[in-house]
Image (cartoon, rainbow, N blue to C red):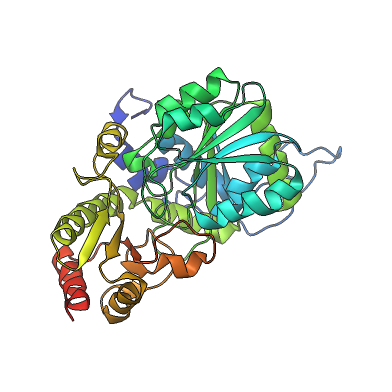
Amino acid sequence: MRHDSTGRTFARESIAAQALGWVDAETRAIVAPIHPSTTFLRDPDNQYRSGRVYGRSDNPTFDQAEALVTSLEGGAQSMLFASGMAAATAVFLSLSSGDHVVVPEVMYWSLRSWICGPGERFGLRVSVVDMSNPEKVAAAIEPGKTKLVWVETPANPLWGVTDIAEVSRLAHAAGALVCVDSTSATPVLTRPLEWGADFVMHSATKYLNGHSDVLAGTLTAAHPSDFWERVRVTRSQVGSIAGPFEAWLLVRGMRTLFLRVRAASKSALAVAEHLERHPRVLSVLYPGLSSFPAHAVAARQMDGGFGGMLSVRIRGGEEAAVRVASRVSLWKRATSLGGVESLIEHRASVEGEGSPVPKDLLRLSVGIEAAADLIEDLDLALGG
């Protein structure tokens, strides 16, 4: 909720739809302008009283996108990045060599590969655990030495759910920070800062933008801190800043965030329930199903739906799964998720050697098409 000058409050979907209600002060336009400039004028006495210096650190077009994400997440400040990977790695690069981090067994594969590759070469000590099991998380944390616990929930592509409040309690008791990748949940369904996390990260390429035409990432902090400022410096020094046009498009996308996520969640549940009964499907992985192992945790910390992402395991193994993906028509065989169009992907082929993903698994990103059409297309692909 948000108060205006009259003291009225507005729901978060109203805030998103109007992008905080910002109006351009000079032109009175209700859609903000794009500022392509990479540099800004100094004052005659050589100062930068405008607060703007150089495009690698800042741009006026970022202001609305960052403020909107901050409002939707209920945080203190947000930063915009060139991609979700840029946002995530900035957090790890702001640690020191020798610091210990705890990360999930199942998580976005590109990030896990970076953490266990360049991250370890950089000097991080990494423990990989089943993040859905608090006892294993507790056993992995080294009091006074663990600096960061990274959570992804629901976790791509098996969609395991982590109890954010419990993991945050364990981490904070040991002096560690918690960052949650909430890309698949979005602030529509889960607000990790309310459950005790210190930071929340999004691959804004996915649901926040929602149209498969922007690369961007965001980080939001619950409170200002020295570590948060280290991340800000890292963003500037590494050059992982987004472009102004991408920032502008991101605001455009977030205006329909609530409509898109709620529609995708409703359809994803319908698809999951249908496929759970299909004789050619071995199992369906979706937190919204009562049969899902972590359904109770998901129901507690996800409000208004369970997201648009699910995975299915196909009877007959890898060959059968790839064959099903080859037969779809409405679903598109493509990497990524969170767009208005529905995507299907044989995830093990993408992740390659060492992936924990079963080879009979297909990852589905449900878009905003008619659920009946999506189900019929899958039935036809499964049928022969």
Q: Is residue 258 visible from the viewing direction of this image?
A: yes
Q: Is residue 354 above or below residue 286?
A: below
What residue is drawn where x is 59% and y is 48%? 87
Q: Is residue 197 above or below residue 212?
A: above
- Horizontal and vertical percent position of residue 51: 70, 38
What residue is drawn where x is 82% and y is 37%? 47
**Residue 264 in which image quadrant:** bottom left
Q: How many marks?
A: 0
Viewer-closest of 9 and 66: 66
- Image quarter where the N terminus lies is top left
- Horizontal and vertical percent position of residue 249: 47, 59
- Image quarter where the C terminus lies is bottom left
What residue is drawn where x is 48% and y is 36%? 70
Horizontal side of residue 290 vs 56, given as left or right: left
Q: Is residue 60 visible from the viewing direction of this image?
A: no
What residue is drawn where x is 48% and y is 26%? 168
Viewer-closest of 377 and 15: 377
**Residue furthest front as drawn:** 316
- Horizontal and vertical percent position of residue 203: 49, 52
Horizontal side of residue 331 vs 213, given as left or right: left
- Horizontal and vertical percent position of residue 247: 53, 54
Viewer-closest of 245 and 195: 195
**Residue 73 in which image quadrant:** top left
**Residue furthest right as drawn:** 45
Q: Is residue 80 above or below residue 162?
A: below
